[in-house]
Image (cartoon, rainbow, N blue to C red):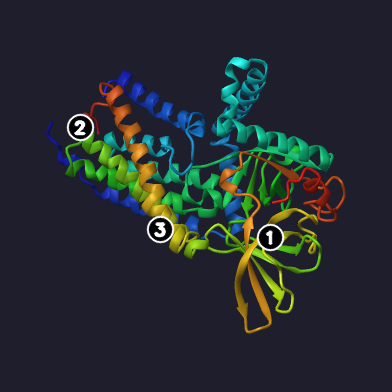
Amino acid sequence: MRRTDKYRFGVILLGLVVLQFSLRTRLGDDRTAPDFLLLALLIYTIRARPGKSAGAGFLVGLLRDALTPASFGAGALAHTIVGYLSALSKVVFFAENLFVNGCLFFAGTWVRNCLVAILSGKLKSGMLGWELLVWSPIQSLSTAVVGVVVLWLFRRELAIRMGDA
Amino acid sequence: MALGSDRYASRADWLLLIGCVFLSVVAMGLPGRLRDPVARALRQTVLAPFLALQEQTQLLAASLTRYQTVAVQRDSAVLAATFLPELRNENTRLRGLLGLGQRLGSGYAAAEVLHQALPTSALTLVVSAGKKEGVRPLAAVVSPEGLVGIVSSVDNEMSVVVTWAHPEFRASAMAADGSVYGIVAPHGTEGPRTWLLVLRGVPYRQLVPNGTVILTSGLGGVFPRGIPLGTVVAVAGEAEGWERTYLLRPAVHPAAVSHVMILTGSRGGGAGGGGGDVRAAFQSAGEMP
């Protein structure tokens, strides 16, 4: 990977992190607005090895747990698993296809929400059902749409180069 | 493009995964006294610039809303914009907070709610006021409509609030006329009554009619007396003929709150102003639920 590519990749990820803490609050309901931070993690896993992706997921999850102590640790575990599986899934799927990546973003967000909701132990029965079957799919869809747009806009910078993984 | 075999998980990848999972499980099992310092340290270091950015965005949004309100009032051509529900709600809420603040006097700190994206975010909120504003643990957090929750931990510039929806939340409560006392707790997450409160411990012979406003009683010294908790909507159950449990419609929903006031207690009383009676502050503008 060329040095300029690395910088561009980093700037895109940083941009998504900034959007999480700025634009996201203006995008309506918390439960349905796209999760830019998770999107940054999933895009990172396009290039990273599964181990590094799991480590990045753990760090992202731990930082989020610091902001939602009701589920402390659950976020770290959920992001670790999602990061690892996302990186691993690139082997199975055709990783440069926009639609496939969109599906991965959708699945990653939904699985993350499922894991957090279940592992935290705070949501049960009806509330858990609503979270998993209504709010999470909507948030997953909005995150996937934003993810596809980001991949399309920055398709040159985010091009997957297997030798650089 | 061909997929290289180096994409498969190596032993190092497995070890990293297992290590991260192990650390996550350890984090989940941490007791509160160890968990809170870790979370606080993260908020005050790595997350500090991002939270500051979020706070500035919130302030900018609020300023923009206020500016738009003034502009709309002055410019009849855009009068229709004032009927946008979101703008009207925001305006009403800010006006309510201003009115409540004046009635409460100086014993409060205003704060923005920094909503997060996780499913459990309505159970605990991060608000943009901390030790610098005089916030202390166990301080009551209110909105013009009523009680939002209680401060659980305090950083220099922000605090974590446990809302009434949290399974561990409890508050000593009474009817508005003082005739009935009990304990208010969240109804739980099962069945169709999610996001309701329950009033427990009411003697069987004391009937509480629907529509009765339930306030904090001030007993226990944590919450000041007189903060609206909710309104009785139904009988939830009876225990062996000696106790009734009532369902309450909450005065305020945590997920819908954008700005709150934290009672700092400087008007007298404990951390949450536990010794005072703030009923008049909520009654005078007809803001009882």
Disc sitting over residue A129 in the figure: 3
Disc sitting over residue B211 in the figure: 1
Q: Secondary structure at mark 3?
A: helix
Task: Between residue A148 and residue B20, name the one nearer to us.
Answer: A148
> The residue marked by circle 3 belongs to what chain?
A
Q: Is residue B158 left or right of residue A149?
A: right
Instruction: Give the crowd class for mark 3: few <14, some 14-19, many >=20 residues within 10 Å.
Output: some
Q: CA distance from mark 1 to mark 2?
A: 59 Å
- Residue at 46 percent across and 62 percent down: it is A124
Q: Which residue is mark 2?
A: A96
Callout 2 amino acid: Glu
Q: CA distance from mark 2 to mark 3?
A: 33 Å
Instruction: Give the crowd class for mark 1: few <14, some 14-19, many >=20 residues within 10 Å.
Output: some
Please say whether residue A79 is visible from this viewpoint.
Answer: no
Callout 1 amino acid: Gly
Q: Is residue B73 left or right of residue A32?
A: right
Residue B71 x/y as whole percent: 64, 18
